[in-house]
């Protein structure tokens, strides 16, 4: 398959990771590596690939879990006690399609052991370890094997040499309700900030918009919300009903709340095509 076909199928953007404050947040975001934009001509052989996880970015400082924006994640003691006294970059994940489960769990300032038992800390880098990524990855793999806890896992990486192979991996993951593919450059130390050290590849796009209204539900949704009316940053408004759970329809997010939605391109009038609701982002 030609490179141009891949560029049509995939969409790359900012890392959409929530950050929620249970108490007083830290004053600054955590210095983590952020995904750059996929472009034709990228030397894919210079990267290892992994599955992009649809969870919440979590940074273990050596003493606590923080979101990317520096807010404390209140996890049960048993969840974090095995972790070492040095930083680990990772993702809190509840399996493919489990983002809302993760969000509900980490938003709770009183951690629920039963819910946290469904969460895994998927670790993918050691920010303060010296050396290029293969060395850091080996050290992390050794650590995870030593810890030997079912909720502490390694994000597996593997070599990928062509765009055709990348596309096959993307199709395979997407067909199983996965989020996409991450590419991590081998010959680089851990560098905070957005760069081509880290690239995400997805078949769909994510974005955020503000709730400005609701429509009434009909039929089986009578007496509930039928759709949210969202306003994009450019002022364009559209309705979104796909992806709304029964709980959201019965008790929708408040007007002014920011929500994340997923879509596949735009219509001729600039409306997100096949838009579906993912989760509220208010307070993140």
Image (spheres, rainbow, N blue to C red):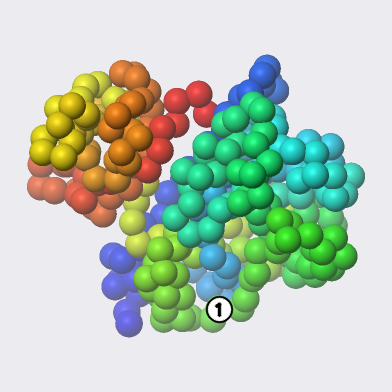
At 10% from the left and 47% from the top, the residue drawn is 268
Q: Nearer the viewer, residue 126 or 56?
A: 56
At 55% from the left and 78% from the top, the residue drawn is 160
Res 240 → quadrant: top left
Q: Nearer the viewer, residue 188 or 271?
A: 271
Q: Nearer the viewer, residue 232 or 92?
A: 92
At 30% from the left and 29% from the top, the residue drawn is 250
Res 2 → quadrant: bottom left
Q: Is residue 123 visible from the viewing direction of this image?
A: no
Q: Is residue 248 left or right of residue 139?
A: left
Q: Is residue 17 left or right of residue 219?
A: right
Count numbered badges in the picture.
1
Where is residue 261 shown, x and y percent of the image?
Answer: 33, 42
The quadrant the N terminus occupies is bottom left
Establish if 79 lies above or below 143: above
Where is residue 108 shown, x and y percent of the image?
Answer: 60, 30
Q: Is residue 283 visible from the viewing direction of this image?
A: yes
Label 1 sits on residue: 160
At 28% from the left and 33% from the top, the residue drawn is 249
Q: Is residue 141 left or right of residue 101?
A: right
Mark 1 closeness class: few <14, some 14–19, many ≥20 residues within 10 Å: some
Establish if 226 lies above or below 145: above
Where is residue 61 shown, x and y percent of the image?
Answer: 79, 40
Where is residue 51 shown, x and y percent of the image?
Answer: 54, 65
The secondary element bearing badge 1 is classed as loop
Q: Is residue 141 left or right of residue 119?
A: right
């Amino acid at each position: 398959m030609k490179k141009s076909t891949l560029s049509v199928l995939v969409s790359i953007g900012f890392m959409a990771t929530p950050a929620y404050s249970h108490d007083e947040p830290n004053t600054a975001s955590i210095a983590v590596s952020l995904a750059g934009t996929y472009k034709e001509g990228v030397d894919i052989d210079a990267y290892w690939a992994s599955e992009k996880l649809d969870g919440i970015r979590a940074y273990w400082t050596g003493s606590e879990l923080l979101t990317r924006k520096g807010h404390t994640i209140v996890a049960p003691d048993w969840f974090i006690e095995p972790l070492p006294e040095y930083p680990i970059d990772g993702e809190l994940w509840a399996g493919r399609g489990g983002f809302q489960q993760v969000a509900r769990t980490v938003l709770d300032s009183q951690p629920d052991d039963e819910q946290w038992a469904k969460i895994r800390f998927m670790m993918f880098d050691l920010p303060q370890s010296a050396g290029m990524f293969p060395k850091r990855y080996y050290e992390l793999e050794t650590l995870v094997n030593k810890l030997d806890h079912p909720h502490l896992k390694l994000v597996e990486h593997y070599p990928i040499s062509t765009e055709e192979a990348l596309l096959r991996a993307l199709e395979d993951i997407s067909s199983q309700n996965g989020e996409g593919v991450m590419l991590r450059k081998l010959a680089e130390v851990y560098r905070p900030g957005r760069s081509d050290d880290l690239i995400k590849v997805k078949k769909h796009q994510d974005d955020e918009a503000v709730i400005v209204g609701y429509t009434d539900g009909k039929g089986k949704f009578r007496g509930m919300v039928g759709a949210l009316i969202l306003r994009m940053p450019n002022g364009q408004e559209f309705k979104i009903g796909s992806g709304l759970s029964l709980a959201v329809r019965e008790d929708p997010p408040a007007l002014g709340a920011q929500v994340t939605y997923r879509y596949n391109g735009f219509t001729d009038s600039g409306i997100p095509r096949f838009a579906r609701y993912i989760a509220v982002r208010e307070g993140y």
